[in-house]
Amino acid sequence: MNYVSLKENSIHKIDNNERRIVAMNKYDYLVVGAGLFGATFAYEAKKKGKTCLVIDKRDHIAGNIYTKNVHGINVHEYGAHIFHTSDKKIWDYVNQFAEFNNYINAPIAAYHDETYNLPFNMNTFSRMWNIRTPEEAKAKIEEQRAEYVAEMKKKRGIPTDAEFEPQNLEEQALSLAGRDVYEKLIKGYTEKQWGRPCTELPAFIIKRLPFRFTYNNNYFNDRYQGIPEGGYTQIIEKMLAGIDVRTGEDFFKVVGRDEPTPKGNVGQAQAIAESESLAAEDFPDDELIINPHAGVLSDGTQILFDKILFTGQIDQYYDYQFGPLEYRSVRFETEELDTDNYQGNAVVNYTAKEVPFTRIIEHKHFEYGTQPTTIISREYSSEWTPGVEPYYPVNNDKNNVLYQQYEELASKEDDVIFGGRLGLYKYYDMDKDLMAALEVVEREL
Ligand code: UDP
């Protein structure tokens, strides 16, 4: 048996065998998921002298903000990502890693043969009702709103002078924007996006969408906004520079939890040791055998780690023991077209329920591209099932209650930290995700 001690954080190398343990590395943190949360944590951990191994089951880094350059166009492979924040600290932080352009998101809504500006603003109202002034728009909305609220109060037996409190997304939208806006621009889109009636969705989802009485098509209210020139992947590449990263590694396989009767990572380490005919005394430090913080990468490298930062699905981490949380997934139909400009805007939402996709993204417009061809992605929303990518947590009451059970288990962990949209089961934008990662950094490092 050829036994080699590697330097510092590596323990041994055994290469006498076909199936061999090629190396053994020890890390402070195993970071699961090379997306924005995991990469931010690893970057800050490295600055503080901690070692991380970052693994991701996909064959690339950057998670859902991954962009790929195709014929000069940065394609947002997992859907449009527009960075926006009101927090100067977060804006400065992300600007360390890329130069941001002055892109302002101003989506268009297509409803049958009608075209509207989003978010709901004077351009939208003027097109909808052929009016011009805020006063006219307010009067129109108030008329529809008042009619709806009166009807609901009657139905629920609420006194006319009492407040009407919207209970769900439909009620929120109708009492805020009136019937026309709801029917043409909200209902169809939202029900396609979430696969549930608007009456079963939380009102907060719609609060993301600004509503204003100026001719301002800026989708976001935030102070800072833009797209990193050259795409998002470079940001994560820079964050992960000098850090051990392994893509194509599924955490549950690495720690031996994909077995039908999972013995956990101790079992995995032992199984490998046995298959290599190694005895405990072959290891100068039998920590490997007894330490539950061990795993094996697909090339046979054994790893030891003190803590885990997990940015995958929290319910999967706990073997779905309270039942699965619901997520929405998205399927993208991407094609390159032989035209320099397909739809004249980066984002066009299709708000009618008869159109099967929710929106079409024309990627070049995020960076004002002038390439001779264009790349578009049609976005189809679907319920998440195992084997497809989860994108959006469905934060309705049922799931939030279920999540609390998982969160309670998580709060008892000394050496596992959860992060990101999937680990925290929160509909985070990038700035909120980054903020949450920096809060963990603050607490942990
Ligand atoms: N929404 C809508 N009509 C639209 C765009 C959005 O009703 O044309 C609603 C819908 O409920 C959606 C929510 O606003 O889920 C948030 O949309 P946004 O585009 O901000 O979400 P993203 O999918 O980009 O995170």
Image (spheres, rainbow, N blue to C red):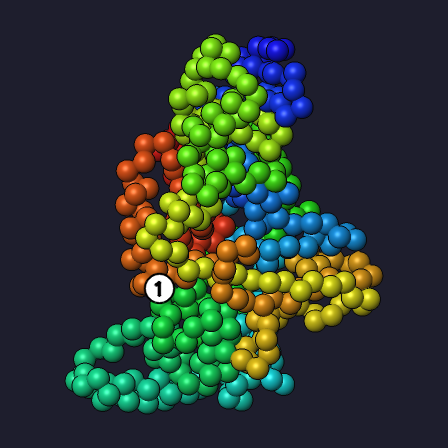
Residue 431 drawn above or below residue 30: below
Residue 364 at x, y = what percent? 71, 59
User: Which residue type carries mark 1?
Assistant: Asn
Q: Is residue 61 visible?
A: no
Q: Quadrant location of residue 4?
A: top right
Q: Residue at x 32, y 42 (%)?
A: 410
Residue bearing the label numbered 1? 396
Q: Residue at x 50, y 69 (%)?
A: 193
Q: How many marks?
A: 1
Q: Looking at the rendering, in which quadrant would you find the N terminus?
A: top right
Residue 19 at x, y = what percent? 63, 25
- Give the side of residue 39 with respect to residue 211, left or right: right
Q: Residue at x 68, y 55 (%)?
A: 75
Residue 411 drawn above or below residue 202: above
Q: Is residue 313 visible?
A: yes
Q: Looking at the rendering, in which quadrant would you find the C terminus?
A: top left
Tell whether circle 1 marks a residue whose Cβ is less than 8 angstroms from ligand 1: no
Residue 303 at x, y = what percent? 51, 25
> At numbered mark 1, what does the secondary structure look like: helix, strand or loop?
loop
Q: Quadrant location of residue 367?
A: bottom right
30 or 165: nearer the eye? Answer: 30
281 or 147: nearer the eye? Answer: 281
